[in-house]
Image (cartoon, grey):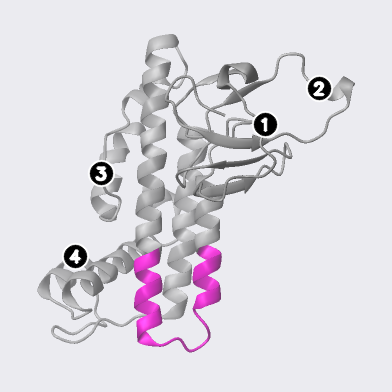
């Protein structure tokens, strides 16, 4: 399949359907989430017997039974036009939970914390990019759309690693990140711990103390990390992605 709008190529296989269950004019979305939606023939489909292994993401739509493969990670299911950030973040939660055993070594804790923050950051950035693209199409095609004011308020953002700043940028939309998780302060502190690990080898500095007010940390000592706080943080990140999806991509 080749998208006639953006030119991106993806692979798709349709499940067998009876004559009565087959739509007369099947339409599909570009899996690269460029926004194109059109007839199957418009994608210039060419029959291949197997999915190309060189494409990044291989997925199965549990609702439609359609298998597809496309470059990229946060993509759009071509069959039902639904993006996959919730599934991608759920996989990250599972990976963190599996990798962090009952008594993980410090290295494993730091590695999974880095993985969690980078996955959340990338997932939210791409989700926001798609939402902004949708907003521009709403503006052009349906300026009276009931959610247009909320969509117009969406900012352009290049990072979600600073949660406090990200929350402030998104508040004008009416969506409060802090209201989507059970312990916002704990999540902010965890992200600040990741910053300390990434830039200070995990050694507490005055910036960390000022931003977190963490009474359990001492200047000049390595910041404490635990399995439970990272797993809980992963679940909170999934809650944020799910809530963003429901408000801006659903």
Lower position in the chain sequence, tag 3 or tag 1: 1
Lower position in the chain sequence, tag 3 or tag 4: 3
Residue neighbourhood size for the residue with mark 1, other residues' Cα within 10 Å, grouped as few (<14), some (14–19), many (≥20): few
Report the Cα–Cα distance between label 1 and label 2: 19 Å
- Label the magenta part by its dominant secondary structure: helix
Proximity of marks 4 and 1: CB atoms separated by less than 8 Å: no
Q: Measuring 41% from the left and 72% from the top, which residue is drawn there?
A: 112
Q: Position of residue 46 (x, y in %)?
A: 63, 28
Report the Cα–Cα distance between label 3 and label 1: 39 Å
Which label number is shown at residue 211? 4
Residue neighbourhood size for the residue with mark 2, other residues' Cα within 10 Å, grouped as few (<14), some (14–19), many (≥20): few
Lower position in the chain sequence, tag 2 or tag 4: 2
Q: Is residue 183 visible?
A: yes
Position of 63 relative to 234 (above/below): above
Q: Secondary structure at mark 3?
A: loop
Proximity of marks 3 and 1: CB atoms separated by less than 8 Å: no
Q: Secondary structure at mark 4?
A: helix
Q: Position of residue 50 (x, y in %)?
A: 67, 44
Q: Measuring 35% from the left and 80% from the top, which residue is drawn there?
A: 225
Lower position in the chain sequence, tag 1 or tag 2: 2
- Magenta segment includes 27: no
Task: Please state the extent of the stretch shown in magenta in the rendering.
Answer: 93-115
Front of the two marks 4 and 1: 1
Q: Quadrant of residue 201?
A: bottom left
Lower position in the chain sequence, tag 4 or tag 1: 1
Camera-nearest residue between 115 and 214: 115
Q: Position of residue 100 (x, y in %)?
A: 49, 79
Lower position in the chain sequence, tag 2 or tag 3: 2
């Amino acid at each position: 399949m080749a998208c006639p709008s953006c030119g991106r190529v993806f692979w798709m296989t349709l499940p067998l359907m009876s004559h009565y269950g087959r739509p007369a004019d099947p339409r599909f979305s570009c899996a690269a989430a460029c926004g194109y939606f059109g007839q199957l023939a418009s994608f210039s489909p060419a029959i291949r017997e197997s999915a190309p292994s060189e494409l990044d993401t291989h997925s199965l739509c549990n609702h439609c039974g359609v298998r597809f493969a496309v470059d990229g990670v946060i993509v759009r299911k071509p069959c039902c036009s639904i993006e996959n950030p919730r599934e991608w973040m759920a996989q990250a939660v599972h990976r963190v939970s599996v990798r962090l055993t009952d008594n993980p070594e410090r290295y494993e804790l730091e590695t999974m914390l880095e993985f969690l923050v980078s996955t959340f950051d990338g997932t939210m950035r791409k989700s926001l990019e798609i939402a902004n693209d949708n907003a521009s199409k709403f503006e052009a095609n349906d300026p009276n759309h009931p959610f247009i004011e909320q969509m117009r308020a969406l900012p352009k953002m290049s990072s979600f690693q600073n949660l406090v700043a990200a929350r402030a940028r998104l508040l004008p939309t009416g969506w409060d990140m802090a209201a989507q998780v059970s312990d916002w302060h704990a999540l902010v502190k965890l992200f600040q711990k990741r910053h300390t690990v990434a830039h200070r080898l995990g050694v507490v500095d005055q910036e960390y103390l000022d931003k977190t007010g963490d009474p359990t940390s001492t200047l000049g000592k390595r910041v404490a990390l635990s399995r439970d706080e990272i797993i809980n943080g992963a679940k909170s990140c999934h809650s944020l992605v799910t809530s963003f999806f429901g408000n801006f991509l659903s």
